[in-house]
Image (cartoon, rainbow, N blue to C red):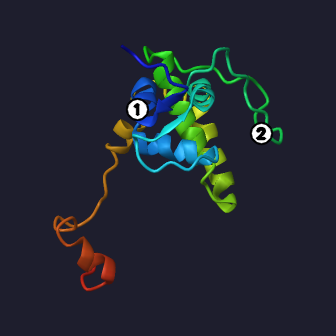
């Protein structure tokens, strides 16, 4: 016989949203609820609010902040499911909130570069492109990086 409850356990909600329980606990704390472990419960109303944040029922409108974004943002092409995209976008928004004010301009330029038309036209990920970077240095550089960085060993 099942018991109906007006509460939702954090680990159940985290599993449903396919997110880490630690991340969900942080999210719930930002909503002003004191939770500490995945077995804690939250109200059905708060659980629904968090669900809506990760999986909006209607398409989200682009955020227009200080005139920096002037046109709708197009979704990237590919076979990524909508659920995965929403989680990724939500993660990004959460992390952006943590960026210090003095680094926002730098972040803005990075985002604009990545979102520019044709910025990733070859289909390769940013990480695969970064993996192609080579450093021209002595053969023992990787093994002795600590000596090179402290000046005990020099290039040349």
Extreme residue toward the bottom, this view: 152
Which disc, if any, is residue 68?
A: 2
Q: Does the rendering let one see residue 156?
A: no
Q: Which residue occupies the foreground of this view, 68 or 39? A: 39
Which disc, if any, is residue 125?
A: 1
Work out whether mark 2 precedes mark 1 in sequence or the reverse, and give the earlier one. 2
Classify mark 2: residues with Cα within 10 Å, few (<14), some (14-19) or many (20+): few
* Residue 131 drawn at (x, y percent): 32, 43
User: Is 142 left, or right, of 135 in this rendering?
Assistant: left
Q: Does the rendering let one see residue 142?
A: yes
Q: How many circles with numbers are drawn on the protein?
A: 2
* Residue 61 drawn at (x, y percent): 73, 23
* Residue 2 drawn at (x, y percent): 39, 16
Whether 78 is drawn above or below 20: the answer is above
**Residue plotted at (45% across, 41% down):** 40
**For numbered disc 2, what is the local secondary structure?**
loop
Write down the quadrant of residue 76 in the picture. Answer: top right
User: Is 114 left, or right, of 146 in this rendering?
Assistant: right
Query: Do the CB atoms of the residues marked 2 and 1 lie less than 8 Å apart?
Result: no
User: Is 125 left, or right, of 91 in this rendering?
Assistant: left
Write down the quadrant of residue 149 in the picture. Answer: bottom left
**For numbered disc 1, what is the local secondary structure?**
loop
Classify mark 1: residues with Cα within 10 Å, few (<14), some (14-19) or many (20+): few
């Amino acid at each position: 016989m099942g018991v109906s409850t007006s509460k939702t356990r954090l680990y159940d909600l985290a599993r449903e949203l396919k997110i880490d329980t630690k991340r969900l606990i942080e999210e719930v704390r930002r909503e002003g609820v004191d939770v500490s472990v995945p077995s804690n419960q939250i109200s059905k109303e708060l659980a629904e609010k968090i669900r809506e944040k990760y999986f909006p029922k209607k398409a989200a409108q682009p955020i227009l902040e200080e005139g920096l974004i002037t046109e709708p943002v197009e979704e990237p092409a590919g076979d990524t499911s909508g659920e995965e995209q929403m989680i990724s976008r939500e993660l990004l928004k959460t992390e952006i909130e943590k960026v210090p004010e003095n680094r926002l301009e730098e972040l803005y330029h990075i985002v604009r570069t990545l979102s520019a038309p044709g910025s990733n036209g070859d289909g390769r990920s940013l990480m695969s492109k970064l993996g192609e970077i080579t450093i021209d240095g002595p053969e023992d550089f990787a093994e002795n990086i600590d000596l090179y960085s402290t000046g005990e060993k020099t290039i040349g």
